Amino acid sequence: MKKFPVVLAAALFAGSLGLAIADDMSPKERLNNQHERIEQGVHNGTVSKAEHRKLARQGRHINRQRKRDLRKDGGTLDQKNRRKLEKEENHRSNEIYNDKHN
């Protein structure tokens, strides 16, 4: 029973570390990371072709939105657009996780 709090604390720390790393990534780096996760899932059979197409379509949409926002804002993302992209990326990241683990 004493191991449970230690395991719980380690899991919470690992989860928060992952979020901190995601916050430090640029949107482009994060899309590349998500692409690699999808390819791993396709390679090991946990992501189906239909799931792959859906996730790829979402990635293209996010990337087009990022490029559009960069053009509109003169080469940098303002806070509003950055938050919007991060929200979309978080959603896609959760879908990748769910697709790989179902």
Image (tube, rainbow, N blue to C red):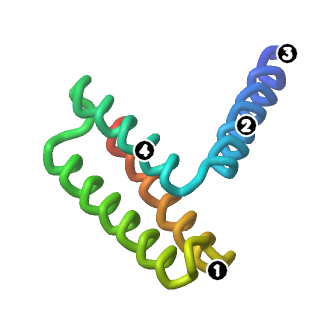
Residue under numbered circle 4: 32
Locate residue 49: give its quadrant: top left
Query: Mark 3 or mark 1: which is in front?
Result: 1
Say few, some or many: other residues with alpha carbon within 10 Å of mark 4 (under 14 / 14 to 19 / 20 or more). Answer: few
Q: Is residue 101 left or right of residue 33?
A: left
Q: For the point 68% across and 75% down, which residue is it? A: 79
Residue that mark 3 sits on: 2
Between 95 and 4, the one lying in front of the other is 95
Q: Distance between the residues labelled 4 and 1?
A: 22 Å
Residue type (three-letter) at the residue carrying disc 4: Asn
Do labels 4 and 3 touch, CB within 8 Å?
Answer: no
Per the image, label 2 sits on a secondary structure element best described as helix
* Image coordinates for residue 100, horizontal then vertical, percent: 35, 37
Q: How far apart are marks 4 and 2 (CA)?
A: 19 Å
Mark 4 vs 1, N-terminal side: 4
Seen from this angle, which residue lies furthest left?
A: 49
Is 61 rendered above or below residue 34? below
How far apart are labels 1 and 2 at the CA level? 24 Å
Q: Which of marks 4 and 2 is in front?
A: 4
Q: Distance between the residues labelled 3 and 1?
A: 45 Å
Left/right of residue 70 with respect to residue 42 in the rendered view: right
Mark 1 or mark 3, which is nearer the start of the sequence?
3
Query: Residue at 66% of width from left, 39% of height from top?
Result: 18
Residue position for label 1: 80
Q: Which amino acid does label 2 sit on?
A: Leu
- Residue at left 44%, top 51%? 31
Label 4–label 1 contact, CB within 8 A: no
Instruction: Name which quarter of the figure residue 34 lies in.
Output: top left
Q: Nearer the viewer, residue 39 or 13?
A: 39
